[in-house]
Amino acid sequence: MPLSPPITDLAELKSHPALARLLGWNSAVVQAAKFDREELTVWVEKGLIREACAILRDDAECPFNYLADLTAVDWYPSEPRFEVVYHLLSIPKKERVRLKARLNGSSPVVESVTSVWPNANFYEREVFDLFGIRFTGHPHLERLLMPDNWEGHPLRKDYPVEGYR
Amino acid sequence: MPQFPPSAVADPGQDRTLVLNMGPQHPSTHGVLRLVLEIDGETVVRVMPDIGYLHTGIEKTCEAKFYQQVVPLTDRIDYLCPMTNNLTYCLAVEKLLGLEIPPKAQWMRVLMNELTRINSHLVWLGTHAMDLGAMTVFLYCFREREDILRLFEMVSGQRMMTSYFRIGGLALEPPIGFFEKVKAFADRFPNNVDEYEGLLTGNPIFLMRVKGVARMTAEDAIALGATGPTLRGCGVDMDLRRDAPYSGYENFKFKVPVCADGDVWARYLCRVQELRESIGIVQQALAGMPEGPVKADAPKVVLPDREKMKTQMEALIYHFKIISEGFTVPAGEVYQAVESPRGEMGYYIVSDGTAKPYRVHMRGPSYANLQTLAKMCEGRLIADVVAAIGSIDVVLGDIDR
């Protein structure tokens, strides 16, 4: 399967159920979209991420009822620095979509999706622990993998691989 | 010491409940899982898993390695299914590269993956039964697991940390006599499954410990992110090998066992049926094993054979280049999911066009399943917590990474 160039034109991509649903709900929510290597990525306005997730979960035709993964990417030193990445799966329709929210580096805060999918709990705690991104509305936002008194957030790009000595 | 978040469940001022620590060295927590239990008498009121004791920062380490150097790290994540982790990572990088894999390598990957699934389920069955008081099953399961580990040793030289798959195919051709050995194993294994089932499936003591225990509905399972046999044991028919085939799984015929009861018993039934289905896939892979190379024709990515390296100048140059400066991967990102013995094993890899991955994230099935534990255990007895942990088959290496 040789690589073909990514498609970024919204008009060409809007047949995908997730993108169609989001555009139908509120066209301001979609910042950009990309179809690359058979996978659809949608950049969502960060203030609307929880509502966008709820809309996708409750879609009647193609419900994205399963949060497969939630993680983040640090693009240090460029801004906006962080991307929170949501991998959604529709169990009935076998469709996948990746949502992304861009956050700036000075105060990375985004609304928690634990009210949409309870299993976001551990994933958001992990992202908080390793990236220092805060999730508002999370029921129990504490460190998960690192010790409670750990300084710094290890998966940030300005954190050295061998740690601070 | 982690604290429970405040909740209305406990009765403040009444001091009815007690906080009990279970693990991380408790034998039935299968590794270094620590559970903080809030109990009222012998009834569990709340459960809070405390994880991170095995956190080694593999995701961070990956960012400092060349793409091919990450493969041996992936074994260490879920040490009971090393090949599945190798496969997921390799498939993800191959997807980033747009690399075509020869059919023999694909079929070998399926064959090894199903043996890995059997291996992993045997460890689960043995330890789960032992947690519930059935000692003998453990010995029988490890007898067959030893056969599989010998097969792994034949192909890769390693029993557990195999690293047998490479980006672009396999490390080596399988050795002479390997397929005969697999065939002999596959022919006798169904009888072994009968043997395990004879000890457990009709055993009234075992049934009392598993039937109706740690029950969960399908809605809860989906909302809490359950995956693999834990999800199928709640009646949700989902298996990535069938729903999103990878590595040539579309060529194989197999059933996906689903059981709607949602209790420990249902998960047991799903996994035991999967043992039988997996051995069927192994038989099909052996019968239809294609001929041909086991490495993709991509000299800039795949290491050349030793023979060529010693006789051809280009092969030597490519070898030197790959080892010393790696290979670049076109910028982009992929999420590759594979059905591991425990459920959806996903690798999210971001490439920035250099020879090292910009970000590697592993979505572990045990991590996903662990979140269902509280739902399963609350309101039940402490003894049922042991049954529930065994039934979701946690591997702490996979949770903590």
Image (tube, coloured by chain):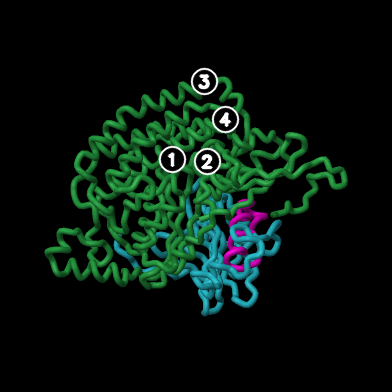
Chain colours: A cyan, B green
- Tell me: B331 left or right of B316: right
Q: Residue B86, how many percent across, how many down?
A: 38, 53
Circles 2 and 3 on the same chain: yes
Would you call the spot at circle 2 few (<14 residues within 10 Å), some (14-19), or many (20 or more)? many
- Tell me: B297 left or right of B236: left
Disc 4 versus disc 3: nearer the observer = 4
Q: Are marks 2 and 3 in contact (CB under 8 Å)?
A: no
Tag on residue B85? none
Q: Earlier in the sequence, mark 4 or mark 1?
A: 1
Q: Residue B351, how many percent across, how many down?
A: 41, 68
Q: Are marks 2 and 1 in contact (CB under 8 Å)?
A: yes
Q: Secondary structure at mark 3?
A: loop
Image point 52% across, 76% down: which residue? Answer: A76
- Tell me: B159 left or right of B397: left
- Alpha carbons under labels 2 and 1: distance apart: 9 Å
Circle 1: residue type: Ser
- Alpha carbons under labels 4 and 1: distance apart: 18 Å
Circle 4: residue type: Leu
Q: Residue B60, how many percent across, how many down?
A: 48, 65
In the picture of the structure, the residue carrying the numbered disc 2 is B393
